[in-house]
Image (cartoon, rainbow, N blue to C red):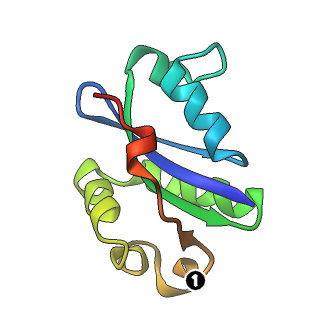
Amino acid sequence: MYYIYIIKCEGDLLYTGITTDVERRMDEHFGRTDKCAKFTRSHRALSLEALWSCPDRSLASRLEYRIKQLTKPKKLRLITDNSLFAELFGSDEAGLYRREDIQRSRYVRE
């Protein structure tokens, strides 16, 4: 299983990435380890905002790319209203991904 996520970072910025292990990857981003992305090393991760799953790497990479192409207002709308997924990506595409519940309190930095 692959996961696509959006993290809110310092400076009111958003970071989108993919992983096969959400807990490990969030620990890397939030702990700013050597394995975190350059972006989250220089823009501290503040909270995990959204998480989707899909069965293979190709689909995950495609969604990551499509989310990165969205404007910030559209990303924020997608975070708060998952029903926009079909509007933004098409109903056929929307059926390939599943929105996951996230434990916000686990991945929030104050």
Residue at image point 48% right, 16% down = 41
Residue 89's place in the image compared with 3, above or below, is below
Please identify the quadrant where the N terminus is shown.
bottom right
The x, y position of residue 29, in whole percent, is 53, 27
Work out whether residue 69 or residue 57 is closer to the camera in this orientation and state it: 57
| Relative horizontal placement of residue 65, taking residue 79 as reference (left or right) | right
| Relative horizontal placement of residue 44, taking residue 90 as reference (left or right) | left
The x, y position of residue 26, in whole percent, is 56, 36
Amino acid on which the number 1 mark rests in the picture: Gly
Task: Categorize mark 1 by other alpha carbons within 10 Å: few (<14), some (14-19), many (20+).
Answer: few
| Relative horizontal placement of residue 105, taking residue 60 as reference (left or right) | left
The x, y position of residue 91, in whole percent, is 49, 86
Residue at image point 46% right, 73% down = 89
Residue farthest along the bottom direction in this orientation: 91
The x, y position of residue 68, in whole percent, is 45, 48
Residue 80's place in the image compared with 68, above or below, is below
Please identify the quadrant where the C terminus is shown.
top left
Residue 16's place in the image compared with 78, above or below, is above
Q: In which quarter of the image is residue 82?
A: bottom left
Instruction: Name the residue tied to disc 1.
Output: 95
